[in-house]
């Protein structure tokens, strides 16, 4: 291994049948500012909320697996150490199966609020690729017949991925190809944005802090929790992805973003988000006054009533 492939969790995707309604619910319940209003991408719908040290993306794929009722945690998306291409090369060395990076360009995939931070007017809005074999041992993405020619390391994969990116960015062809390019129901991905991410994050953080001053008093996302039926095997998979970050007690600290936490569970997948609070008692009072405090809350951990957030497991610690 020559260096890190990823450095932090950039965002978490939540999926629902109504991404705009979901964003409105989460914005109200958690007092979250809008980082980017609805982007009607040809292959998916997207609204981005600021949560301090990361973003939440409310999404719905236009093809592929569709969500059921409520809101589900769908994806963890990491920031590459340098570029998506370099991360892909490093992950190939680590034998982590993934797609070659796809570049999403043009006005149909461009968050308007990110325009002031763009590196250049004509460059991609983002480059992204999903990866397999870490969240669980399955490889549903790279094993898909329509995706095999785009598996990183396959001869010609970069050429095919470049063409697929152009298709995905086009209004008509993108909609037609949405099912072919859709991720699995739960997934991991790496995303390289085409704008000045630190500057945009700073602006998001300022809006988040202002909203929290009059809201529940959250400080950001502390942990993204995943579960595994075989923790020992899962630990090896996660370490292979996150190296050289070390998991202390199955908790990997990833820069200034949320930590990744692995726990034993009945399934391999995304479990919950743990947010931080400046004052747990003030947050408790705010949640109580807004009928948001859920059963199972303790002196050290608050739970948001799941029925108010589409069934999501959201917790808050001091």
Image (cartoon, rainbow, N blue to C red):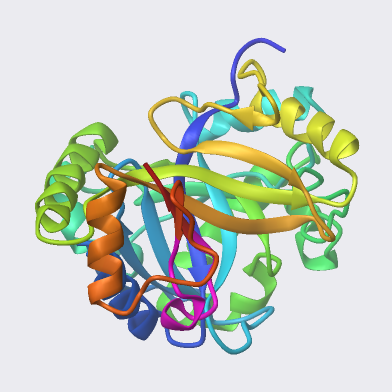
The answer, for residue 215, to whether it is visible in the render is yes
Query: Which corner quadrant of the image does residue 93 belong to?
Result: top right
Q: Is residue 16 left or right of residue 201?
A: right
Q: Residue at x 65, y 18 (%)?
A: 246
Q: Is residue 134 left or right of residue 287?
A: right
Front in this rendered view, residue 21 or 106 = 21
- Residue 307, magenta (yes or no): yes
Residue 120 visible to an observer of this rendering: no
Q: Is residue 261 left or right of residue 318?
A: right
The residue under the point 84% across, 60% down is 266
Compared with 46, 225 (above or below) is above
Report x, y in % for residue 210: 9, 52
Q: Quadrant of the C terminus?
A: top left
Q: Is residue 174 magenta?
A: no
> Which x, y percent locates residue 105?
37, 57
Where, quadrant-wise, is the N terminus in this rendering?
top right
Which portion, as a residue range, is magenta?
Answer: 303-314
């Amino acid at each position: 291994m020559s260096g890190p492939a990823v450095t932090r969790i950039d965002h978490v995707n939540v999926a629902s049948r109504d991404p705009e309604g979901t964003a409105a619910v989460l914005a109200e319940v958690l007092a979250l500012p809008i980082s980017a209003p609805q982007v009607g991408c040809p292959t998916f719908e997207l609204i981005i909320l600021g949560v301090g040290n990361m973003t939440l993306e409310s999404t719905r794929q236009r093809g592929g697996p569709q969500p059921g009722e409520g809101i589900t945690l769908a994806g963890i998306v990491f920031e590459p150490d340098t570029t998506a291409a370099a991360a892909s090369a490093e992950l190939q060395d680590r034998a982590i199966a993934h797609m070659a990076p796809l570049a999403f360009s043009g006005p149909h995939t461009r968050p308007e609020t990110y325009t002031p931070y763009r590196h250049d007017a004509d460059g991609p809005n983002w480059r992204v690729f999903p990866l397999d074999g870490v969240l669980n041992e399955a490889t549903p993405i790279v094993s898909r017949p329509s995706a095999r020619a785009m598996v990183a390391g396959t001869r010609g994969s970069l050429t095919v991925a470049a063409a697929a990116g152009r298709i995905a960015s086009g209004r008509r062809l993108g909609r037609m190809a949405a099912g072919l390019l859709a991720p699995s129901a739960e997934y991991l991905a790496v995303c390289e944005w085409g704008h000045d991410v630190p500057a945009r994050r700073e602006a998001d953080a300022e809006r988040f802090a202002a909203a929290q001053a009059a809201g529940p008093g959250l400080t950001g996302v502390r942990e993204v929790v995943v579960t595994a039926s075989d923790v020992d095997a899962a630990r090896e998979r996660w370490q292979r992805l996150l190296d050289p970050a070390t998991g202390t007690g199955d908790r990997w600290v990833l820069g200034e973003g949320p930590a990744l936490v692995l726990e034993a569970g009945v399934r391999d997948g995304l479990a919950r988000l743990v947010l931080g609070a400046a004052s747990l008692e003030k947050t408790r009072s705010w949640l109580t006054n807004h009928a948001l405090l859920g059963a199972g809350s303790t002196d050290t951990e608050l739970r948001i009533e799941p029925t108010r957030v589409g069934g999501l497991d959201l917790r808050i610690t001091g």
